[in-house]
Amino acid sequence: MYPRLIIDLKKLESNINGVAKITKEQGKMSLMIVTKGLAADKEMTQMVAKHPAVDFMADSRVKNIATYVDGAHANNKMTVLLRIPMHCEIEEVIKNVDLSFNSELSTIKLLNEEAKKQSKTHNVLLMVDMGDLREGIFFQNEEEIFKTVEEILKLENINLYGIGVNLTCYGAIIPKSDNLGGLVEIAGKIEEKFNIKLNMVSGGNSSSIYLVGKGEMPEGITNLRLGESFLLGNDTAYGTKLEGTTDDALILEAQIVELKEKPSLPIGEVGVDAFGEKPYYEDRGVIKRAIIGIGKQDTDLGGMIPLDSDIEILGGSSDHTILDVTKSKNAYRVGDIISFKVEYGAMLKLATSEYVNKVYIR
Ligand SMILES: *Cc1c(COP(=O)(O)O)cnc(C)c1O
């Protein structure tokens, strides 16, 4: 059945080898594989759990982690919650997560209470905001950082595992030796001030990996958290392909439901489209238009890259996507399948949609 997402587990496995070569061998850092981009797909997380190069398995949602915590533990991997916990999910966090990212003392105190109840010690990574302005204590407020550390160290069932930063998410700030170096400096000050050793200084996501190749990853960054670079094979700071990875481990296939020659300009008074937006059209005369059975409910139309590079995506609505196939060398017919590579947003929606079938190459 179409639409379907083909997940090539062998290619994903070799992508892990590729990123491990960079982060572990060259960079001497631990490797945290992030599973949220494929909505913690079961087959994928089983492969990740068994992969010897993976040290941690992380996701932003506790519900996803709960599906693979047993497999992770059976393979000696810690589970990690990337999104700062909500107060309503504390019990589930303690149950399923070994290490959670945090920035609010009130939340860490609730984690402590619940960990006590469940007779566990919960690990916490304190997030520091180095300028991207998403989560974390702002780096210029060092007193707040130290005060929070001091309070965390008093909590009996909490272990301060380390500190970390997230970049290139809200503010699109690119990791450099200065902002990551600043994080290492803060880690050093914490270790000195409190006479402790931090297990982890986590230097970001797939936008940080490019620094290793340039030899600019500051010493003292001991971990990277990789989702997109493992799934799609690119660094996300500059979008370059990473050596040893492929960008076609995930392929979307959709079926043509209509193929007709029609004008490129709609006829009549122009209002707004199905999503309340005013469309833009280019007059190309009469073109060959293919409609495929997939739409905005299933994916991001702008994040689909046709393998047939002569195809252009014109637009679509909830359930339909319209392609200009005029220039294609293939003589498409109704019922034919069109294949696409995917970008992050498109992948995320495809993985989440119950209308998209998943098939695996093993
Ligand atoms: C999503 C996320 C990651 C992984 O990001 P990628 O760009 O997919 O590598 C890492 N850290 C945090 C905090 C995240 O939310």
Image (spheres, rainbow, N blue to C red):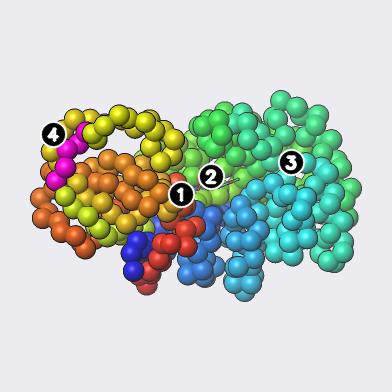
Number of labels in the image equals 4
Disc 3 crowd rating (10 Å Cα; few below 14, some 14-19, many 20+) is many
155 relative position to 197: left or right: right
The disc placed on residue 285 is 4
Residue at screen point 77% across, 38% down:
190
Residue matched to label 3? 103
Find residue 56 and report its image quarter.
Answer: bottom right
Q: Say if disc 2 is inside 8 Å of ligand 1.
A: yes
Q: Position of residue 289 (x, y in %)?
A: 19, 46
Q: Could you tell me the amino acid type at mark 3?
A: Ser
Q: Could you tell me the amino acid type at mark 2?
A: Asn
Q: Secondary structure at mark 1?
A: helix
Residue at screen point 33% across, 51% down:
320
Residue matched to label 2? 205
Q: Could you tell me the amino acid type at mark 1?
A: Glu
Magenta stretch, residue numbers: 261-265
Are discs 4 and 1 less than 8 Å apart at CB? Answer: no
Q: Residue furthest top?
A: 140
Are discs 1 and 3 less than 8 Å apart at CB? Answer: no
Q: Secondary structure at mark 4?
A: loop
Disc 1 crowd rating (10 Å Cα; few below 14, some 14-19, many 20+) is many
Q: Could you tell me the amino acid type at mark 4?
A: Gly
Residue matched to label 1? 228
Q: Say if disc 1 is inside 8 Å of ligand 1.
A: yes
Mark 3 or mark 2: name the one nearer the start of the chain: 3
Q: Secondary structure at mark 2?
A: loop
Of the residues tagged 4 and 3, which is closer to the observer? 4
Are discs 1 and 2 less than 8 Å apart at CB? Answer: yes
